[in-house]
Image (cartoon, coloured by chain):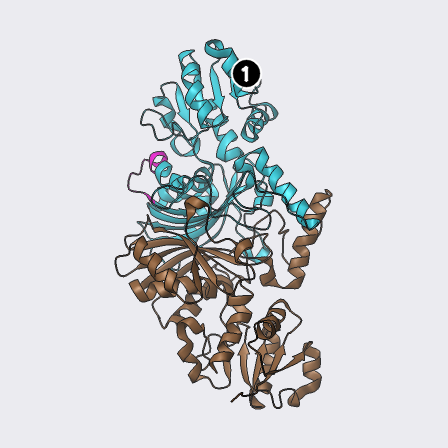
Chain colours: A cyan, B brown
Amino acid sequence: MKKEYHIAVVGATGAVGAELLRVLVASGRSAGKTVQFHNEPVVVEELGENSFDKIDIAFFSAGGETSRRFAPTARKAGAVVIDNSSVFRMDPDVPLVIPEINGQDVKQHRGLIANPNCTTAVALMAIYPLHRAFGIRRVFAASYQAVSGSGARAIAELKSQVEAAAEDRQSPARVYPHPIAFNVLPHVDVFLEGGYTKEEMKMQNEGRKIMHLPEFRASVTCVRVPVYRAHSVAVSAEFEKRVSVEQAREVLAKAPGLELVDEPLQNRYPMPLTVAGKDNCEVGRVRIDCALDNGLAFWVSGDQLLKGAALNAVQIAELL
Amino acid sequence: MKKEYHIAVVGATGAVGAELLRVLVASGRSAGKTVQFHNEPVVVEELGENSFDKIDIAFFSAGGETSRRFAPTARKAGAVVIDNSSVFRMDPDVPLVIPEINGQDVKQHRGLIANPNCTTAVALMAIYPLHRAFGIRRVFAASYQAVSGSGARAIAELKSQVEAAAEDRQSPARVYPHPIAFNVLPHVDVFLEGGYTKEEMKMQNEGRKIMHLPEFRASVTCVRVPVYRAHSVAVSAEFEKRVSVEQAREVLAKAPGLELVDEPLQNRYPMPLTVAGKDNCEVGRVRIDCALDNGLAFWVSGDQLLKGAALNAVQIAELL
């Protein structure tokens, strides 16, 4: 028996929304489902209270403001909201879910489920299976984040700055505070009081909630790099138990949603160019951490529009 | 009284050699000195045993092979060799010197002084003053390394790949094993048995020697990024003593060869684009590390052709 679902995608014209539609349609996951577009937040506003009538699942990916304003409307109308913004993630009544890690948390939803931060999701895809095997205590991480994480305008900004450089002229920085072409910016999201950015604290805060590990510590530096698509994260991780590279590789090779790409002598390791467009995240450069006693260093890359956003949201919907 | 020095630059046509000449000449540091060029290793070979007659200081920056072959010749002829390659750095008879840190080690030279690895030099410019104040134990670091670190051919490779991308064609990877344009490569220098690269182990190995700290631990991931010039490093550092951001900023602001650029709310932090061409390294994003008890996280950028190579070599020569 085929059940029919009515789905709304709020923010369908954005970078994540486009991927959401692609994942829903192209992968055949939406067979028998009716996809309904609300391209502009304004349109949603005009539709008002009735926008979500007969909608079963509403994907929100139009920024925090839209989620804050319209998620309650969608819930009231009986839709389950899967929200890609950070607005509700730390709300104790809202499950924050990576299906491969805490899929069972979906059951506790009250009409709203949050999708995690993209860099956090990519890193946890490797951290969590290692945690299951060795018990994670803390991580030190530095990210290499693609401009598509800032949306379509950021992609255009990198492109126009690179073109301008080829002609020895300058193209202004608008999305970012400084040029991103041929530069790296240690600045993703807004700065908080202690000097970390909001983005940097997400791995610790969201990681604790997703892994059910209130003691988990994560010190992260988030950096925007001139890459169009896919985030990478360099990780040093400390565990409770003794680890070996062989055991770690075995664990990672079996982990769902993850591929072990770790043949450095053949120049094989995860990279944004090769992981872009792939559902699975990739992990490699696995080695015993030389500054930790029970530690591993490794490198994860993942398409942050897919596992970090659209794919994960659709996977949550599938759990419902 | 003005003393005249005769100087040889081996590898003067390379990226570092060009900077060496610029630092020597443009800064007026070479006033009264005679600069003598040996543009090609072949020329040096032809000149043979007599190449370094009457030379006081010979800068070597033409790769490990040239240093290995011709540094002994230069020494025998009475020149003091300042070598930018990694060949002699860990030799216990060879001082490895960053003048701001262990300038006094120059005195022990036996005709050869080694210049440190560029990423190590940039990171230590911030790590060492903090060590003096708080006692460094270990660091976790991830680098964002510019293509100029691989020489002029790598600069051309990034340029041609970016141009090709603008015309929707591909330009082959020759210097690097994969495209560097719009990509990041967790691969700098060759892989060692344990899974680290040679480059990654330099911060621990050279850091121990330069700071006279045999217990210093450093877990590093070295990553090539599509930036033309200047390396950056994200660092988490653990100290013996309690640290505060205020004390750390004070120490860093006073450190020689370093500038504190740390006003995140005004979007001021070190970046490759702004530090390129500058003698001083820059440090910012200073914050209490949230995964360490006595720890700081920070971000350093520096022109690796200057402090990481040419400038440091000339500073060593000035100590002689």
Element on which disc 1 rests: helix
One can see residue B174 in this view: no
> What is the x, y in percent for residue A51?
49, 12
Q: Chain of mark 1?
A: A
Residue A215 shown in magenta: yes
Left-right relation of A48 to A229 = left
Q: Quadrant of residue A93?
A: top left
- A203 or A13: which is nearer to us? A13
Q: Position of residue A182 (x, y in %)?
A: 59, 51
Q: Which residue is mark 1?
A: A43
| Disc 1 residue type (three-letter) | Val
Question: Which residue lies most toward the left here?
Answer: B242
Residue B248: give x, y in percent of width and height: 33, 58
Residue A72 position by quadrant: top left
In the depicted structure, whether residue B21 falls above or below residue B254: below
Instruction: Answer yes or no: is residue B114 visible.
Output: yes
**What count of labels does the image hold?**
1
Crowd rating for badge 1 (residues with CA inside 10 Å; few <14, some 14–19, many 20+): few
Which percent across, then down, holds residue B206? Answer: 44, 69
What residue appears at the point 53 percent right and 34 percent down from the top-left corner?
Answer: A305
Residue toward you, B208 or B320: B320
> In percent of the image, x 60 and y 71: which residue is there?
B26
Membership of A185 in magenta stretch: no
* Left or right of residue A70: residue B246: left
Extent of the magenta region: A208-217
> Where's the C terminus of chain A, which quadrant?
top left
Q: Is residue B245 left or right of residue A319?
A: left
Pick the residue in front: B31 or B252: B31
Q: Nearer the viewer, residue A191 or A302?
A: A191
From the viewer's perspective, is residue A201 above or below residue A184? above
